[in-house]
Amino acid sequence: MYSYIASREGLKNLLSKIPMDLAKIKKEDLNKEILRAAIIAEFDAINLYEQMAALTDDKHLKTILLDIAKEEKTHVGEFQALLLMNDEQQKNELAEGKKEVEELTG
C-alpha cells in the first residue's frame, strides 16, 4: 500500500503554502480561490490523519487521529457552504453532478 506520508515527496508536500499566485487572481475571484485552496488543504489533512490512523497500532492515537479527520470533514463542509454562497456556477454544477449520479445509479 502506497502511503502519502511515507514518501519524501509526500513530506515535502506537507509544507504549508498557498497553491496559487495571488497577484494573478482577479479581485472578484479572490475569495472563491481562497475557499477552494482551503477545501484542498482540508482534504489533504483528512487523508493524512486517516493514513496515520491506518499505520498505528496504538488505539488511543488511532481514535484521536480519526476524530481529528472527522473534524476536518466538517471544515470541508463549512468552506464548501461559503463557496456555494459566493459562486452560483459552482452551486449549479454541484447540483447537476448530484443529479447525474442519481440518474446513473438509480
Image (tube, helix red, strand yellow):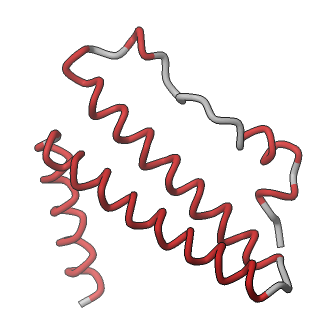
Q: Residue shown at 82%/76% (left/top)?
A: 55
Q: Nearer the viewer, residue 76 or 93?
A: 76
Q: Quadrant of residue 22?
A: top left
Quadrant of the image for the N terminus? bottom right
Give residue 91's position: percent from left, percent from top: 16, 52
Q: Is residue 53 above or below residue 31?
A: below
Q: Nearer the viewer, residue 101 or 77?
A: 77
Is 90 positioned to the left or the right of 105 in the image?
left
Is 87 positioned to the left or the right of 57 in the image?
left
Q: Nearer the viewer, residue 5 or 1?
A: 5
Most distant residue in the top direction: 23
Counting labels gives 0
Give residue 100's position: percent from left, percent from top: 22, 71
Q: Residue shown at 73%/76% (left/top)?
A: 53
Is 66 positioned to the left or the right of 78 in the image?
right
Q: Is residue 90 above or below residue 94?
A: above
